[in-house]
Amino acid sequence: MSPKLSLILLLFAISTSASRVLAIGVNWGTTASHPLPPPQVVELLKSNNITKVKLFDADPLVLQALSGSNIAVTVGISNSMLRSLNSSKKVAESWVHDNVTRYFSNGGTGVRIEYIAVGDEPFLQSYGEQFHPFVIGAASNIQIALIRAKLENKVKVVVPCSFDTFQSESGLPSRGHFRPDLNKTMIELLTFLSKHQSPFFVNISPFLSLHQKKNISLNFSLFKAAAHPRNDSHKTYKNSFDVSYDTLVTALTTAGFPQMDIVIGQIGWPTDGVANATSSIAETFMRGLMDHLHGKLGTPLRPRDPPIETYIFSLLDEDERSIATGNFERHWGVFTFDGQAKYRVDFGQGLRNLVNAQNVKYLPSRWCVVNNNKDLSNASASASEACSIADCSALSHGGSCFNISWPGNISYAFNTYYQQNDQSANSCDFGGLGLITTVDPSVENCRFSVQLQSSLSASLHGSWLVQWMVLLILTFLEYLLGFAYY
Ligand SMILES: *[C@@H]1O[C@H](CO)[C@@H](O)[C@H](O)[C@H]1NC(C)=O
Ligand SMILES: *[C@@H]1O[C@H](CO)[C@@H](O)[C@H](O)[C@H]1NC(C)=O
Ligand SMILES: *[C@@H]1O[C@H](CO)[C@@H](O)[C@H](O)[C@H]1NC(C)=O
Ligand SMILES: *[C@@H]1O[C@H](CO)[C@@H](O)[C@H](O)[C@H]1NC(C)=O
Ligand SMILES: *[C@@H]1O[C@H](CO)[C@@H](O)[C@H](O)[C@H]1NC(C)=O
Ligand SMILES: *[C@@H]1O[C@H](CO)[C@@H](O)[C@H](O)[C@H]1NC(C)=O
Ligand SMILES: *[C@@H]1O[C@H](CO)[C@@H](O)[C@H](O)[C@H]1NC(C)=O
Ligand SMILES: *[C@@H]1O[C@H](CO)[C@@H](O)[C@H](O)[C@H]1NC(C)=O
Ligand SMILES: *[C@@H]1O[C@H](CO)[C@@H](O)[C@H](O)[C@H]1NC(C)=O
Ligand SMILES: *[C@@H]1O[C@H](CO)[C@@H](O)[C@H](O)[C@H]1NC(C)=O
Ligand SMILES: *[C@@H]1O[C@H](CO)[C@@H](O)[C@H](O)[C@H]1NC(C)=O
């Protein structure tokens, strides 16, 4: 290459990367027993200057709340729909019509849908091959439906790929490749994406890398300058993010798509449920990540070419997420389930602290605890039963409630079950071992939560009132008989 040409190319590269706006968004999942109402979540996004959001479905209530907000939206298609979307263009057409087209309207009252995410990590290794054969067909049919709806210039079709779609046995980015069982599918996917100028959506997880691979230090995961660097063919890697990113870049290059744009679909750090999952470590990780992205330095294999967009995982904690990969899964939120910031992170609001959700409607200030005056020899069985249904992830090893002593942990289990069941009196029975209290049993970092009023509990308001009355009468009787516990 002539020096002149390379100079022009260099200037071009600098000008395009400089004009590129750093785009940070969040994932908004709703796998919660009592999700924060969508209008309040949209307020939360706006008050924190969050301009992009990635959804896992196309819930009409969520999309309605996003109408007119000017927030850019990725709508999602669940894995369970892939089979029918692959086999029928009609199904794809009605999906696009019902969940995309009708939100496009003139006059700024519509929803700014940018991407349709086909499947949620359909290639995750633990799923086996159950979704592989349908992904490309489903994506193609959705694309055809978009063209029919004349939306192909506004909305792009993407496939969120899990962190385990690519790998490097030696841990060196220069040896990156796609998982062998995916070679053929990946070529098809990349061909499809490149044909439609759509980016490659990928989830990167320095937290999971720390967990699964023994040879990564916490400092390396947290972008700490003190971390021991890793050398790889004349390149020096200073953090776990760059290692994962460049492993993917090598895989893309090897597959014949070296220029493919990359979007980080999910990246975050959980705050509970296992060792090293704390708010303070999460804050350090986020600061390191934001500084890295804002620095626009890119990675050793893609200098000055950072990911075009990055979606933080996640906005809120979700108490019904699967814990198949670990108890931390329910604690990815930058905000707690009720929209309270756990730590500081700069979404573009600068030095200002994050703004919490406003006017959050809680159930009454009541908790369910174990009655210490009873024979507790069988209490553990009741607690296990409660935990098999409700969220006890904070009780696990390394979790925020791990070191509260027995029977405090039994109370924790009883309360989480009671809250999940909208504080119905019979959900605090436990064979007579449960006791309803108005005194907050929280200890230090271990928070005994009071759940949100959900639309479900609101509709049960009638039976609610009856329970209240019964409780009042019982308390009064107990008082008369001298059995008052508190
Ligand atoms: C962030 O949002 C607030 C409130 O929505 C607004 O007043 C402020 O101008 C925004 N800041 C930036 C930097 O966009
Ligand atoms: C996907 O759909 C195509 C077109 O209908 C069909 O030929 C193919 O068999 C389907 N794939 C699978 C795995 O069912
Ligand atoms: C989207 O569209 C399909 C097909 O019309 C429909 O079955 C589904 O309920 C809609 N909503 C979501 C969240 O997928
Ligand atoms: C997939 O690709 C990797 C490297 O790119 C290669 O080692 C492997 O043999 C390939 N597997 C198949 C099934 O083609
Ligand atoms: C991690 O980095 C900190 C400085 O940020 C340093 O004090 C500490 O010794 C490092 N830990 C290890 C295990 O290298
Ligand atoms: C672990 O990583 C260090 C550098 O980070 C490297 O020198 C060492 O060879 C690695 N060990 C193994 C077993 O991969
Ligand atoms: C990595 O490379 C740097 C210079 O590029 C060198 O100073 C350092 O010693 C190397 N580290 C290892 C473990 O080889
Ligand atoms: C958590 O971090 C510490 C260092 O602070 C490390 O020794 C430990 O192995 C880590 N635990 C896990 C499960 O990653
Ligand atoms: C504990 O459970 C066993 C078996 O269900 C039962 O026989 C026993 O009476 C129970 N003890 C108490 C104190 O409830
Ligand atoms: C439990 O652990 C936390 C953090 O590890 C600590 O701050 C707290 O003092 C511990 N509580 C008890 C009762 O040991
Ligand atoms: C509560 O703590 C006791 C003693 O540490 C332990 O044996 C029991 O399994 C714990 N129960 C739950 C539900 O965490």
Image (cartoon, grey):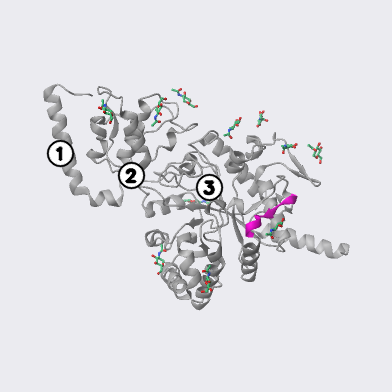
Q: Position of residue 200 (x, y in %)?
A: 61, 60
Q: Would you place residue 40 above or below residue 220 in this image?
A: below
Q: Secondary structure at mark 1?
A: helix
Nearer to the camera, 193 or 378: 378
Residue 178 inside the magenta-drawn segment = yes
* Residue position marked by numbered label 2 in the rendering: 452
> What whole-number distance in Å separates the C-alpha atoms at marks 1 and 3?
47 Å
* Residue position marked by numbered label 3 in the rendering: 349
* Residue position marked by numbered label 1 in the rendering: 469
Looking at the rendering, the stretch of residues picked out in magenta corresponds to 174-182
> What whole-number distance in Å separates the C-alpha atoms at marks 2 and 1?
21 Å
Q: Position of residue 22 (x, y in %)?
A: 61, 54
Q: Earlier in the sequence, mark 3 or mark 2?
A: 3
Q: Secondary structure at mark 2?
A: loop
Residue 165 inside the magenta-drawn segment = no
Mark 3 close to ligand 1, CB under 8 Å: yes
Judged left or right of residue 322, residue 3 is: right
Q: Secondary structure at mark 3?
A: loop
